Amino acid sequence: MVQRVYPPSPRGRPRSFDIDAAIDRAMNVFWSNGYHGTSLPDLEEATGLSRGSLYAAFEDKHGLFLHALDRYIDDALARLDTELDTPEGALAGLRTWLSGYVDRTSGVNGKRGCLVVATAMELAAHDSEVQHRIARFFRLLEARLTARLLRAQANGELAEGIEPASAAHLLVCVVEGMRVVGKTSPSRATTLAMIEILLRQLTH
C-alpha cells in the first residue's frame, strides 16, 4: 500500500481539521464530477474548509486531487486483497473479485464509474504525475492477479495452456472495460453471464 505523505502544516499554525476526512470528501467530489468539472467552491463546500486552508494543506487543487487519487487507489487495492483472500481456493478468490465488479458496474454504481478509468481518459495523456499513479496501479493489480493465477496453476485449478501473466493482463482489461460499459447500464444478468464465460475459459 502507498504510504501517504502529507505536506507539513505552516509553522506555528497546527491543523484544526481531519485531513483524512477532507481527502475522502474531496475524492467523492472528483469521482462524481471529474477533475475539470470540480471547482474550488465545490471542494470548499464538500470539505467545509476555506480556500486558504485547502491551499495550506495541499498547495492547490491539483495537489488535493493527487491525494484523492492515491486514496482511491489504496482503497481499491485493499479491497482486491480482501476479495482474493479466500480459503476455498485460488480461483474462488478470483470469482469473488469478479463478482464484486458486477455490483460496481450495475445501477447507480455503474453510472458513477471508476475514478481511475475516468482520470486515465481525462488527464493521463498530459499529466505525468497522474499517468505514473495509474500505470503503477495497473502494474500492482496485474501482479496480484498473476500471483493468484500462479497459485491456481500450482493447485491444478487452471486450464492447460493458460499463461498466468497474460491471463492477468486480460482480466485487468476486462474489468476496466466493464467500468466503461457500466455507464450505459447493462443488465446485471448480462454481466454475470460474461463473468461465467470468462471463468469457464480459465478452468477448462
Image (cartoon, rainbow, N blue to C red):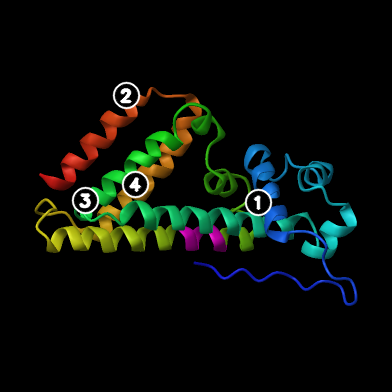
- Please provide percent x and percent y for residue 64: 72, 57
Q: Earlier in the sequence, mark 2 or mark 4?
A: 4
Give, as a three-letter code, the residue at label 4.
Answer: Trp
Task: Work out how far the residue at label 4 is from the one at label 1, CA to CA, in angstroms.
Answer: 23 Å
Residue at left offset 21%, top offset 51%: 91
Would you name the residue on which mark 1 appears? 24
Q: How many discs appear?
A: 4
Task: Where is residue 77? Give x, y as percent.
Answer: 45, 57
Estimate the spatial distance between the alpha carbons at disc 3 and disc 2, rounded to whole Å: 21 Å
Residue in front for this viewpoint, 121 or 15: 15
The 10 Å Cα crowd at callout 3, few under 14, some 14 to 19, many 20 or more, is many
Which residue, given by chain and number where applicable, does mark 3 sit on?
91
- The CA distance from mark 2 to mark 1 is 32 Å
Q: From what the image shows, is residue 130 above or below residue 190? A: below
- Which residues are the magenta region? 132-137
C-alpha separation, residue under disc 3 versus residue under disc 4: 10 Å
Kind of residue at badge 1: Asp
Residue with the mark numbered 4: 97
Asked if residue 143 lies left or right of residue 63, the reply is left
The quadrant of the image that shows the C terminus is: top left
What secondary structure characterizes most of the magenta part? helix
Please, which residue is most extreme toward the bottom here? 11
* Mark 1 surroundings within 10 Å by alpha-carbon count, few (fewer than 14), some (14 through 19), many (20 or more): some
Mark identifier at residue 189: 2
Secondary structure, mark 2, is helix
Residue 104 is left or right of residue 48, and the answer is left
Question: Mark 2 or mark 1: which comes first in sequence?
Answer: 1
What residue type is disc 3 on?
Leu
In the image, is residue 187 above or below residue 147?
Answer: above
Residue drawn at the location 23% of the way across and 48% of the way down: 92
